[in-house]
Amino acid sequence: MTVVPHWRKPEAAPLTLSVDLAEPRAPVIRVGGDLTFTTAAPLREEVDRRLAEHPQVLVFDFAGLHFIDSTGLSMIVHAWREGQRCGSTVRLRSTPRFLDSILALTGIARLITRPLPDATSAADRRLHPPTASA
């Protein structure tokens, strides 16, 4: 057990990001290290960049994640919300046990698996625009 004096906080492990574009319709963002208030900005930029391309699915691979705080959790919700707006599905894979527990306790796990009420219709409109009738 490591005891850290209250005046000295442990430093966060640096965030590592990589993007696999082998399948353009389903890019994979690999997230490692600590996803916290001080490290989340690059992930938000990457999420927004990928969702601007309107992929069918945006996948997060959390196999290398060591820690997540409320800002990190809000990034997952942000990705889901923005994905719903542009017709993209967000999927999580290789989630560590601690993240599974947090997602379940906060209700985010249920949120990620359910679409917004009008998200499907927005995606359908983008893929199948209305045709003019005579």
Image: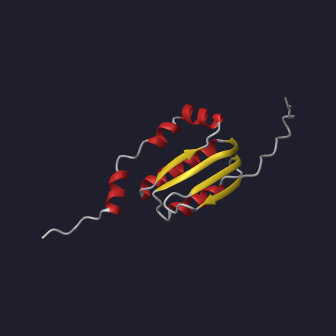
Image quarter hosting the N terminus: top right
| Residue at image location 55% in from the left, 33% down from the top | 104
Residue at the spot x=66%, y=42% of the render? 69
Point 61% across, 41% down: residue: 95
**Left or right of residue 77: residue 125:** left
Q: Is residue 83 above or below residue 131?
A: above
Image spot of residue 124 (x, y percent): 33, 57
| Occupied quadrant, residue 22 | bottom right
Q: Position of residue 86 (x, y in %)?
A: 43, 58
Number of labelled discs? 0
Image quadrant where one finds the C terminus: bottom left
Color theme of the render: secondary structure
Image coordinates of residue 76 in percent, x first then y, are 56, 47
Q: List x then y, in percent, for residue 8.
A: 86, 40
> Toward which corner of the image does residue 126 lie, by quadrant?
bottom left
Q: Residue furthest top?
A: 1
Q: Is residue 47 left or right of residue 89?
A: right
Query: Looking at this rendering, what residue extends furthest in the front direction?
Result: 22
Q: Which residue occupies 70% across, 52% down?
A: 39
As rendered, which of 109 and 59 lies closer to the eye?
59
